[in-house]
Image (tube, rainbow, N blue to C red):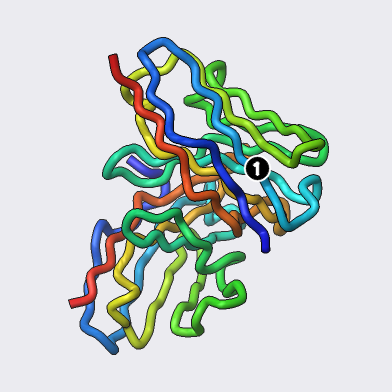
């Protein structure tokens, strides 16, 4: 049971927009800690997708965006493509600076 | 280019120890931290801990306290993670990742390919 709650799965058709939520508490996201997002394609290592709530590393398409409000954060993917099919994880911290991961969300492109 | 190269797969018996290495290249090793994350088969990501390559300060996940030790060797730009008293629940892919400091915490911007550790009698 992860401290950060994500939906186990989301799906969308090519070209559509999907969002993945990450719900925490006043002990982690709500305490002001940043949220970061990672994409894990099948059989590969995770890859940084969004850092500092809403910043994209170089090379990440602007179809991916992140936001944070209160005790939650969201990842939005617009113009869905088949190659976006992957697992997505949010990550934040608690007061002991222990990193916390969400349980992960499997994105299926229909 | 920045990369982290991890050691090869390991098979261990219950009760044994394993030491995984993570060799960094393409950047100044002591400028960043190294995080260790593991992933059990079919499961999500689990943070194990972090070590500063600058001053060797560590922060371990509470559930692994007493069983895990993270170290660095700045002469070879290599980080190590040792896990002792292995049990079947430690079977997982172990990843190292570079930690970039941001506003008092950090994000993991470069990841190794992972090391599979299998614990089986």
Instruction: Using a 10 Å C-alpha cutoff, classify the residue at mark 1 as few (fewer than 14 neighbours), some (14 to 19) or many (20 or more).
Output: some
Task: Kindly indicate the quadrant of the structure image that contains residue A8.
Answer: bottom left
Q: Residue at x 39, y 59 (%)?
A: A40
**Position of residue A33 in the picture relative to residue B46 (left or right):** right
Q: Residue at x 75, y 33 (%)?
A: B73
Task: Kindly indicate the quadrant of the structure image that contains residue A20.
Answer: bottom left
**Position of residue A43 in the picture relative to residue B60 (left or right):** left
Q: Residue furthest left?
A: A110
B68 relative to B41, above or below? above
- Where does the C terminus of chain B fall, quadrant-wise? top left
Residue B27 placement (x, y as % from top left): 76, 56
> Which one is nearer the viewer's eye here, B7 or B100?
B7
Residue A36 placement (x, y as % from top left): 53, 61
Task: Kindly indicate the quadrant of the structure image that contains residue B26.
Answer: bottom right
B27 relative to A96, above or below? below
B4 relative to B71, above or below? below
A27 relative to A67, above or below? above
Please tell me whether mark 1 sits on a helix, a strand or a loop: strand
**Position of residue B64 in the picture relative to residue B50 (left or right):** left
Residue B66 placement (x, y as % from top left): 56, 16
- Where does the N terminus of chain B fall, quadrant-wise? bottom right
> Which one is nearer the viewer's eye here, B57 or B119?
B119
- The residue marked by circle 1 belongs to what chain? B
Q: Which residue is mark 1?
A: B23
């Amino acid at each position: 049971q992860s401290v950060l709650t994500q939906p186990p799965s989301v799906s969308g058709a090519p070209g559509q927009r999907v969002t993945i939520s990450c719900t925490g508490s006043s002990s982690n996201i709500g305490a002001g800690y940043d949220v970061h997002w990672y994409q894990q394609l099948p059989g590969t290592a995770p890859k940084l997708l969004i850092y500092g709530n809403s910043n994209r590393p170089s090379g990440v398409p602007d179809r991916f965006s992140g936001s944070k409000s209160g005790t939650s954060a969201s990842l939005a993917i617009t113009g869905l493509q088949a190659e976006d099919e992957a697992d997505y994880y949010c990550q934040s911290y608690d007061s002991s600076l222990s990193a916390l991961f969400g349980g992960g969300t499997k994105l299926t492109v229909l | 280019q920045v990369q982290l190269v991890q050691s090869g797969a390991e098979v261990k018996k219950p009760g044994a120890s394993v030491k995984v290495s993570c060799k960094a290249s393409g950047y100044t090793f002591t400028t960043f931290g190294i995080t260790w994350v593991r992933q059990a088969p079919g499961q999500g990501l689990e943070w194990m801990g972090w070590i500063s390559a600058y001053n060797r300060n560590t922060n371990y996940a509470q559930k692994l306290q007493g069983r895990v030790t993270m170290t660095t060797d700045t002469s070879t730009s290599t980080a190590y993670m040792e896990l002792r008293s292995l049990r079947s629940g430690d079977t997982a892919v172990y990843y190292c990742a570079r930690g970039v400091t941001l506003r008092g915490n950090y994000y993991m911007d470069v990841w190794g390919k992972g090391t599979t550790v299998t614990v089986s009698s």
